[in-house]
Amino acid sequence: MLQLPERFASFDEARQQGFLKVKKLKEEGGKVVGTYCVFTPRELIFASGAVPVSLCGMNEEPISDAEEHLPRNLCPLIKSSYGFAITDKCPYFYFADLLVGETTCDGKKKMYEYLGKLKPMHIMQLPQTAEGERALSWWRDEMVLLKERLEQEFDTEITADKLLEAIKLCNQERHSLKAFYELGALNPPPLTGEQMLSVLYSTGFTIDKEAQKNSIDELIAAILADYEAGKNRIDPSRPRILITGCPIGGDTQKVVRLLEECGAVVVCFENCSGVKGHDQLVAEEGDLMTALADKYLNVACSCISPNDNRIDLLSRLIDQFNVVGVVDMILQACHTYSVETHRISQFVKDEKGIGYLAIEVDYSQSNLEQLRTRLAAFVEMLS
Ligand code: BJ8
């Protein structure tokens, strides 16, 4: 039987080996759809017989290539995603038959114009607000347009039965991921934030969702068995941190690593790599296109205005995970999340009465000591 550290390592390996699985899928005639955002209704992609893979760039490596076309003062996630696309360094991009993007922030929207010259591209026009019937019906229409595009692109019909099956599959994935990340609510926690993130991050690259569900269920059982036997309990005196803000993973894992090296433990990730995409299920009855529109309009993203959903979600998670500090990780030049820091800071400090720190980071690994100093001071204050 695999020991716990090996079980975590197997998720890293699954991510690294994921592209071999995609290559095999393509050789067998399968179709791949590249996605860039939690707003993408993956259910429609599965129902078309294709598999979705996340193409969000999380690494510094291709950024210098991207800067030949894009401004330097732009979000690293956008530059990295674009850099991977133009250099053919990302096998997932290479294998993608179709790309799907949404009109979220300005930088992403404009990048999609360029990506559309490299691959077939479908853009979903996201409403600017989640409030009111008009936004819901607009977004439902966009679901229908994506469905039609997928049917046309892959010469298939997305029937109600296929869609329902895909909705159930994705809901099951959400159930098992939720059970996994809610382990962080235990006190003392049974795993570190780095371990939690390695599993959450791997799911964007895993195409066999049934196998993924089984591995996560087994991992949960192993963690709980150790925990109940008194093993792998994190020191309860370590300040419990929630991370919010822009998507985290790849080169920004440095934030989690440094926080934990400074003596804290990250127990919850509210951002798109964590709870944000998995919190709400898609209804499995009624009009399924409306059900998709409803779920995917309520993503607590700063591109939506007003973004009250983020406050509601944060409030619930701060209580559930019993955190004493919130770190708001902003990617360099991300205006929407950056502007929201004022509201989030007031809410966390004044209404929840706990610590708050906003940090702006890029993907570089060269300024670690400066970052460490700021995080260490915050952890010390919480201790
Ligand atoms: S649902 S958070 S994945 S848009 S790319 S907004 S960091 S400047 S990634 Fe996002 Fe979808 Fe929202 Fe989630 Fe800022 Fe960079 Fe834009 Fe970004």
Image (tube, grey):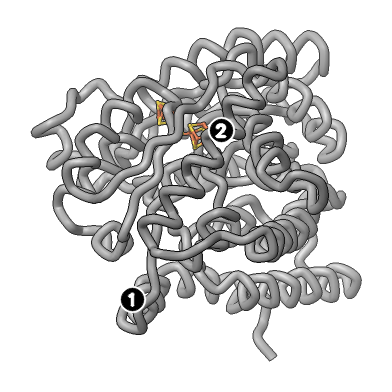
| Inter-mark Cα distance, 2 to 1 | 30 Å
For residue 146, side relative to residue 311 (left or right): left
Residue 102 placement: quadrant: top left
Which residue type carries mark 1? Lys
> Disc 2, disc 1: CB below 8 Å?
no
Which residue type carries mark 2? Asp
Can see residue 58?
no
Residue 360 placement: quadrant: top left
Tally of numbered tags: 2
Q: The N terminus lies in which quarter of the figure?
A: bottom right
From this view, report whether residue 134 is shown above or below residue 327. Answer: above
Q: Which of marks 2 and 1 is nearer the N terminus?
A: 1
Please provide percent x and percent y for residue 277: 63, 43
Label 1 Cα crowd, 10 Å radius (few <14 / some 14-19 / many 20+): some
From this view, report whether residue 376 is shown above or below residue 221. Answer: above
From this view, report whether residue 73 is shown above or below residue 203. Answer: above
Using the image as rendered, state which of residue 118 and residue 47 is in the foreground: 47
Which residue is at 77% across, 76% downward? Answer: 222
Q: Residue furthest bottom?
A: 1
Please provide percent x and percent y for residue 249: 47, 48
Q: Mark 1 points at which residue?
A: 26
For residue 257, side relative to residue 110 (left or right): right
Can see residue 219?
yes
Which residue is at 79% across, 35% downward? Answer: 317
Using the image as rendered, state which of residue 142 and residue 166 is in the foreground: 142
Q: Name the residue under label 2.
A: 141
For residue 114, side relative to residue 239 (left or right): left
Camera-nearest label, 2 or 1: 2
Which residue is at 60% across, 70% downward? Answer: 209
**Is label 2's Cβ within 8 Å of ligand 1?**
no
Which residue is at 30% across, 82% downward? Answer: 27
